[in-house]
Every structure is written in C-alpha cells, then in structure tokens.
Amino acid sequence: MKVVVGSTHLGDFFSRQLTDAFPEVEFVAAYDETAQRTASVDAEVFFGWPSREAFIAAKKLRWIHCPGMGIDRIVAIREIVESEVIVTNAPGPHVVPMADWVLGVMLALAHRLPDAIRDQQTKRWPTGEYEGKVVELAGAALGIYGLGAIGRAVAVRAAPFGMTIRAVDPAPAEIPV
C-alpha cells in the first residue's frame, strides 16, 4: 500500500515515524503540489488536503484523511465530492486546545494584553491609556456560531466567567453550562 503524506500538520517528521512504525507500507512525503501530483498517481491513501490536480492524477486513490477537523478544501473540489473516495477527518484532538485558545484570546483582547506587552517591552507604563478600555467578561454576552464540539467546549469554559452565552446552530441543542 502507498500512502502520500501531503501535509506537515503533524510535523515534517511524521512520515518517517510512520515508516518506522509500519515498514510494510510505503509512505511518501510530498509537501508541494508538484510532488503531490507525482506521488499520488499510484497511491491508495492521501494524508492531508490534496489539490484538485493531485486528486485527478491519483488513479488508485481510495481514501483521503484530513488531519484536522476542516474538510472545506476537500468539498470545494467537485471531482472529490463526486467520487467514491472515502474522506475522513480528525475532529477530537483539536477541541480542547482550540477552546482554550478562544478563551485565551478573549481574555487577552478584553484586558488589552497585546498593548500591555508592547508597553512592557518599550518600558512604558501609560496606565492612563488603559482607563475605561479594559472589558470585563463577567456580565458580557458571548455569541457562539456553531455549537459543535469546539463551540460546546468554549461555552463550558466561558460560563464560569459569568458570561451570558447564546448559540446559533443548525441543530438546536442545550448550551452545556
């Protein structure tokens, strides 16, 4: 079996780790479009997000695995959508770090952390510039568009801050707070 590793999403060493773990499988690292087109011709599996040209070149492809949640680049390619090739993704691993990141950015922006770091680096302490410009999360409203795994995890993390949480989702569900 031949697998094209067309993404460095898990590090450029990932294909070597796979080769060490599964020596009976041929893993080919192909990170640019030309390499992907060439390597895909006789591959059965593509790990990453193949371009339209790489997909069309792949005559034996049976499976595309996207290492993240998003498959928007895949479903934008009509030939993939209309094919019998199986497309999978990996939604679980990104939920916790993404929800943590969302809360971290909310706090950083609400408390003007980028400005404070810049001021600290230039050894300026203009406290007057911050007066009335720091936003408290307590009592603020948080809108979540899409109450999937990440949206739900963000809601769970935001609730203890005393935020009012509203969510919009095609499949209505209870907000998990």
Image (cartoon, grey):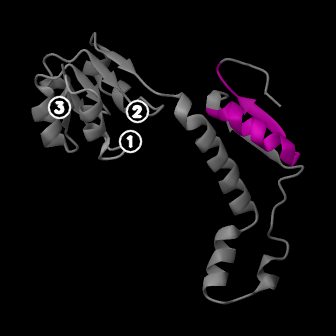
Left or right? Give the position of 174 relative to 64. Answer: right
Q: Residue at x 25, y 40 (%)?
A: 16
Circles 2, 1 touching at the beta carbon (< 8 Å): yes
Q: Which residue is mark 1?
A: 10
- Mark 3, mark 1: which one is toward the viewer? 1
Is residue 167 highlighted in magenta? yes
Question: Residue 99 at x, y = what percent?
Answer: 65, 42
Q: Earlier in the sequence, mark 2 or mark 1?
A: 1
Question: Residue 87 at x, y = what percent?
Answer: 36, 19
Amino acid marked by disc 2: Pro
Q: Which residue is mark 3?
A: 53
Residue 123 image-quadrant placement = bottom right
Number of dots carrying numbers: 3
Q: Earlier in the sequence, mark 3 or mark 1?
A: 1
Q: Residues within 10 Å of mark 1 (few under 14, many from 20)?
A: few
Q: Which residue is mark 2?
A: 67
Instruction: Provide the residue span drawn in magenta.
Output: 150-170
